[in-house]
Amino acid sequence: MAGLVYSDFERIDKPGTKMDTSTTLYVKGEECAYVSRGGLKLEKAIQSFNLNLTDQLILDVGASTGGFTDCALQNGAKEVYAVDVGYNQLHWKLRSDERVHVMERMNFRYADAEDFTSGQPDFAVCDVSFISLKHIFQPMARILKETGQAVVLIKPQFEAGREEVGKKGIVRDAKIHKRVIQEVIDFAFSNQLYAKGLDVSPITGAGGNVEFLLYLSKVPTSNQITDQLINQVVQDAHK
């Protein structure tokens, strides 16, 4: 769902939510340009990191409804591999688009380059839940072209220790955010994925969790993600 439907009391963001028949519902805000608000995250990354997806073959890990896939196509992507372990989540607009390779019920942890019939992807995007990025980087590095790049969403609630995650799955501690970001960068490096950029996601995740956009490349870079940058990005996220 796009997250635009509200009652007088709260946002209604789950299909099948039960409520009194007298409840008034209304749509708040402008309609999202993508099939889901997730597309706004990739849109921010494209702007922040000055990305060019024109004629690129894109790998979307954790495609879900297809917000990232939709954004990539609207920004000139040639084709998209829409990969998800789930089934029947991808929006019909994308499911019926011949540029989209629908790869459902696929556990990306066990994917190989041979699974991608139009060739190795130029660029990967990733928005996954209930799994650490540490399980994603190895197959991502294996499947991307030698010059491949990626934007991944760091979700602290799935990277931090269980004891560090608060009620309702929320991580609020800036120190944990900083440490998690550094750990993800270090683990990406150990898989020959080199950090080139970092920014805060323009929208929060479930329950209001702060999330971060990390730009990676298989080509070694002189652009280092410094402690100062991490501190600044986390500070911006907590404003």
Image (cartoon, rainbow, N blue to C red):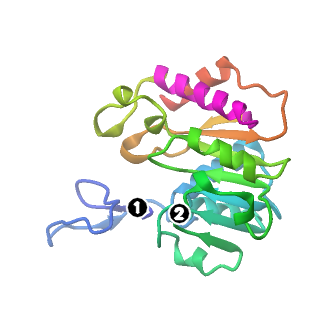
Q: Name the image quarter holding residue 73.
A: bottom right
Q: Which residues are magenta?
A: 175-196
Q: Judge whether 12 appears above or below 198 on screen.
A: below
Q: Quadrant of the N terminus?
A: bottom left
Locate residue 234 relative to residue 14 in the image: left or right. Answer: right
Find numbered disc 2 in the image and state the secondary structure of the residue it sits on.
loop
Q: CA distance from mark 1 to mark 2?
A: 9 Å
Q: Which residue is mark 1?
A: 4
Q: Residue at x 42, y 28 (%)?
A: 161
Query: Which badge, 1 or 2, comes first in the chain's sequence?
Result: 1
Question: Callout 2 environment at 10 Å: few (<14), some (14 to 19), or many (20+)?
Answer: some
At 85% from the left and 48% from the top, the residue drawn is 146
Q: Amino acid at mark 2?
A: Cys
Q: Is residue 57 left or right of residue 183?
A: right
Percent of width and height locating residue 185: 65, 30
Percent coordinates x, y for residue 90 in the rendering: 52, 70
In the picture of the structure, the residue carrying the numbered disc 2 is 32
Within the magenta stretch, is there residue 185? yes
Are the residues tagged 1 and 2 within 8 Å (C-beta)?
yes
The image position of residue 6, as x and y in percent, is 31, 60
| Image position of 169 (left or right of 104) | left
Q: Amino acid at mark 1?
A: Leu
At x 85% / y 47%, what residue is drawn?
A: 147
